[in-house]
Image (cartoon, helix red, strand yellow):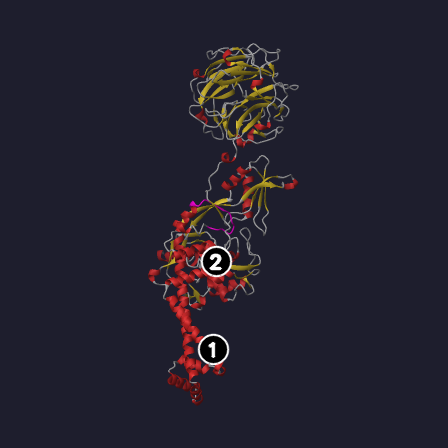
């Protein structure tokens, strides 16, 4: 059993799956080319039905199924599969996405370059062996003038081994071969001066040279290949106006446009790719063109990056240059062993093959020339004694008698005597005699040349170089695959999206969106503002804050849970757009509402989050405790009965806490009174509330001479109060009066700590937003009522205020959640 399996394995390796390093062909491909050559199907002849060719090859050389032979013939004719097609097909030979027509419909003949592989095959340049039924002879290898193993590559799976060799450019390979002839010591890496890397028929871009260098030097490696794509304006589908789109014009080797488009569509349907509204394959005979239409809020660079990461638009070509090498030690032409070959070894094996072919061709030509010269010598002897020759022939009773007489009289051998007997009388004229002498002299020069060539290895190499240059001039073309010097760096979405400031809106019914902050121009005090978000009836704006695109949002809910979300994942909309339901982005329960959102750029151990509940409990937690949040969320704080989480602020650990209530009371104390607690702790008492009062604002501050407490009422009045007017008190006290009200219905709506030069954005329940500088708001004492900050519409009221600042150095952005 073991011997039988080994015999089977070697049969598959040598006779089916692995190509010969010399001509780059597997047996089936070699037999197809030789069979078509024997059938006279050279490029100048008419096409022949593929079925007839397949039948000839199968009946004479390859007794395996006709479908296997036809599939191989088809691939040899497909320009998308072979860098240099070896078969000139006529009819529907299919492509990477579509099968070829049946063999009874298609026709084929040899391509021009195939004749270079067959050149001199009749000159005893290669060994022949009996076919499967011992009725014909077939070549063990073709005398190929080109290193087809590199030009077209090869793919095959044998028993216990496989080969996968990429195609290369003919001009580069032949120039590298010539350089290797001139300098046999060139290494594989040095050969990259001429052979830049693989050149796929489908084009594409090779990302970086490290994979190429490894594959060339070791015979194994991985080469990342990308399709070519551009971001451009395209007509919208269904008659819509122009949109941004991604147009793919080339794909990695063996990837068909139809299969690629289907893959993208499937991933969009399964929500594995976002930002794509439509995919259309517009590929035609002029080239590949797959158009991917993007949604209006999509980032084209991000979508393209995801296409590279998750689809066949980028993939690695695994190189394994395994080929059959003749075992020269055994001295038998049909003894081979599979070897993984570096680039330099492949070229040297081809050069050695060409040396042998040219040598055997020259020996054959020398033998033919010497045989002809020998006959001509007999002619010349006969012509010098023509009268005697005629007399001998006329006097002979038989041909044999005449032959023997000529051989004896003029010291001729049998071949010369036969040639004289077969010579036509017209060659006896003087002019013909001169031609014979001229031919003899010419052949003598040829013989001298052949002997000189066989006596000099350098002259053989020079002749090989001449032939390679002729082929390069005849078939050389431009490289199709570009090579980028830089590798395929793994890019995240943050690498592609500018870290721009954004305004984020969340309504009471948990609809969310983001808008570029520069959409809001700074306005004067006492102005109406512009619409920031269109809300529906009974759905007021609940949270408004600013954050940077690269920030991560910690979304805290009334139930004490916290979720994580990227700012860039929020839908971008116009100022009047409602936004997207937050449940589409986070698994927030129906009984939960978003009570605080903190943008964070970095999670550090020396940064903290300070939380305040509706029932006036407060606690401090390390920011790093929230670095890893699963999609289902984690506990941020444990709440008592009837309590809800209301506010969260980032802190450096040494700030002051300031809390405001609806009745206009405010308390300030040191954050150091709060020891860090775990996520599941409840906290301690923050402030003592009067009956009917509630907390409406909370902030943390490091103080400073320019620190002010900004207080704004629900009816649009506000002021700045020097922070120093709020002396530090003990935690849990009642606090001090922060403002007086215009009327009995007025309530404190928001409280934040600001500094000179800062800008704020004020939002109302009806979604009206005004952006202004705090310097335009007058500084007043605690007992003053303030000035009109914003004109309000009927039944509208101020709900939040958010400062606009840069990312904080303590692990987040200090804008935090809306007041």
Q: Which residue is mark 2?
A: 472
* Residue 787 forms part of the magenta stretch: no
Q: Which mark is in front, 1 or 2?
A: 1
Q: Residue 84, image x and y in percent?
A: 50, 56
The span shown in magenta is 198-210
**SS label for mark 2:** helix
Query: Can you say whether 400 is above or below 649 in the image?
Result: below
Query: Can you say whether 296 is above or below 652 in the image?
Result: below
Task: Give 294 or 539, whichever is nearer the viewer.
Answer: 294
What residue is drawn where x is 40% and y is 68%? 450
What residue is drawn where x is 45% and y is 46%? 223
Gap in angstroms between the C-alphas marked 1 and 2: 38 Å
Quick one: quadrant of the N terminus? bottom left
1 or 2: tag closer to the N-terminus: 1
Q: Residue 142, image x and y in percent?
A: 44, 62
Quick one: quadrant of the C terminus? top right
Q: Is residue 665 visible?
A: yes
Q: Is residue 131 visible?
A: no
Q: Residue 123, image x and y in percent?
A: 43, 68
**SS label for mark 1:** helix
Q: Which residue is mark 1?
A: 435
State left or right for residue 235 relative to residue 341.
right
State left or right for residue 693 relative to residue 30.
right
What residue is drawn where x is 52% and y is 16%? 708
Q: Residue 113, image x and y in percent?
A: 50, 60
Q: What is the number of the mark on residue 471?
A: none
Task: Give 643 or 779, whichever is nearer the viewer.
Answer: 779
Residues at discs 1 and 2 in contact (Cβ within 8 Å): no
Query: Crowding near pointer 1: few (<14 within 10 Å), some, many (20+)?
Result: few
Q: Main secondary structure of the magenta part?
A: loop
């Amino acid at each position: 059993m073991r011997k039988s399996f080994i015999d089977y394995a070697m049969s598959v390796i040598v006779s089916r799956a692995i190509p010969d390093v010399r001509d780059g062909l597997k047996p089936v491909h070699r037999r197809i080319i030789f069979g078509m050559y024997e059938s006279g199907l050279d490029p100048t002849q008419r096409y022949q039905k593929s079925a007839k060719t397949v039948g000839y090859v199968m009946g004479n050389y390859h007794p395996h199924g006709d479908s296997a032979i036809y599939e191989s013939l088809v691939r040899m004719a497909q320009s998308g599969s072979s860098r240099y097609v070896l078969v000139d097909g006529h009819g529907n030979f299919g492509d990477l996405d579509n099968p070829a027509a049946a063999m009874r419909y298609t026709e084929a003949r040899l391509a021009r370059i195939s004749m270079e592989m067959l050149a001199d095959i009749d000159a005893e340049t290669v060994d022949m062996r009996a076919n499967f039924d011992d009725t014909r002879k077939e070549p063990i290898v073709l005398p190929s003038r080109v290193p087809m193993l590199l030009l077209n590559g090869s793919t095959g799976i044998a028993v216990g081994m496989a080969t996968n060799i990429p195609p290369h450019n003919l001009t580069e390979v032949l120039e590298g071969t010539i350089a290797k002839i001139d300098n046999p010591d060139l290494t594989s890496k040095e050969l990259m001066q001429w052979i830049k890397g693989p050149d796929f028929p489908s084009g594409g871009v090779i990302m970086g040279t490290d994979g190429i260098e490894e594959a060339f030097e070791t015979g194994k490696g991985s080469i990342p290949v990308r399709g070519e794509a551009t971001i451009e304006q395209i007509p919208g589908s269904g008659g819509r106006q122009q949109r941004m789109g991604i147009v793919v014009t080339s794909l990695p080797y063996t990837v068909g446009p139809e299969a690629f488009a289907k893959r993208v569509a499937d991933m969009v349907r399964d929500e594995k790719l976002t930002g794509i509204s439509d995919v259309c394959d517009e590929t035609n005979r002029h080239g590949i063109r797959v158009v991917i239409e993007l949604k209006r809020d999509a980032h084209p660079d991000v979508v393209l990056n995801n296409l590279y990461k998750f689809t066949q638009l980028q993939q690695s070509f695994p190189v394994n240059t395994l080929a059959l090498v003749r075992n020269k030690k055994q001295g038998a032409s049909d003894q081979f062993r599979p070897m993984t070959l570096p680039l330099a070894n492949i070229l040297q094996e081809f050069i050695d093959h060409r040396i042998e072919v040219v040598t055997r061709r020259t020996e054959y030509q020398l033998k033919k020339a010497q045989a002809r010269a020998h006959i001509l010598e007999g002619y010349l002897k006969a012509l010098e004694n023509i009268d005697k020759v005629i007399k001998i022939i006329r006097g002979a009773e038989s041909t044999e008698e005449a032959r023997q007489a000529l051989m004896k009289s003029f010291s001729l051998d049998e071949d010369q005597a036969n040639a004289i007997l077969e010579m036509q009388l017209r060659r006896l004229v003087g002019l013909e005699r001169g031609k014979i002498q001229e031919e003899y002299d010419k052949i003598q020069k040829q013989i001298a040349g052949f002997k000189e060539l066989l006596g000099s290895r350098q002259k053989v190499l020079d002749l090989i170089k001449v032939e390679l240059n002729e082929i390069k001039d005849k078939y050389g073309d431009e490289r199709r695959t570009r090579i980028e010097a830089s590798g395929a760096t793994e890019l995240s979405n943050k690498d592609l999206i500018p870290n721009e400031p954004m305004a984020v809106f969340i309504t009471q019914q948990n609809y969310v969106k983001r808008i570029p902050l520069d959409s809001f121009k700074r306005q004067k005090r006492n102005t109406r503002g512009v619409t920031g978000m269109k809300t529906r009836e009974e759905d007021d704006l609940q949270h408004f804050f600013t954050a940077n695109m690269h920030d991560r949002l910690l979304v805290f809910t009334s139930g004490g849970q916290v979720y994580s979300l990227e700012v860039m994942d929020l839908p971008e909309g116009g100022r009047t757009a409602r936004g997207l339901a937050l449940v589409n982005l986070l698994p927030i329960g129906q009984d939960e509402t978003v009570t605080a959102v903190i943008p964070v750029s970095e999670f550090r151990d020396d940064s903290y989050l300070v939380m305040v509940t509706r029932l006036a409990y407060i606690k401090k937690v390390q920011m790093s405790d929230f670095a890893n949040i699963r999609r289902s969320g984690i506990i941020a704080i444990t709440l008592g009965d009837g309590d809800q989480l209301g506010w969260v602020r980032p802190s450096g650990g040494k700030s002051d806490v300031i809390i405001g209530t609806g009745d206009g009371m405010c308390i300030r104390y040191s954050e150091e009174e709060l020891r860090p607690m775990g996520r599941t702790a409840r906290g301690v008492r923050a402030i003592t509330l009067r009956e009917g009062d509630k907390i409406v604002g909370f902030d943390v501050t490091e103080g400073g001479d320019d620190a002010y407490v900004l207080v704004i009422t629900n009816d649009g009045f506000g002021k700045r109060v020097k922070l120093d007017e709020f002396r530090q008190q003990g935690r849990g006290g009642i606090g001090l009066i922060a403002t007086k009200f215009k009327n009995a219905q007025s309530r404190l709506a928001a409280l934040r700590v600001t500094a000179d030069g800062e800008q704020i954005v004020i939002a109302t329940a009806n979604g009206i937003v005004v952006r202004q500088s705090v310097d335009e708001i007058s500084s007043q004492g605690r007992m003053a009522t303030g000035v009109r900050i914003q004109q309000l519409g009927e039944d509208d009221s101020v709900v939040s205020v958010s400062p606009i600042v840069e990312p904080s150095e303590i692990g987040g952005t200090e804008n935090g959640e809306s007041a």
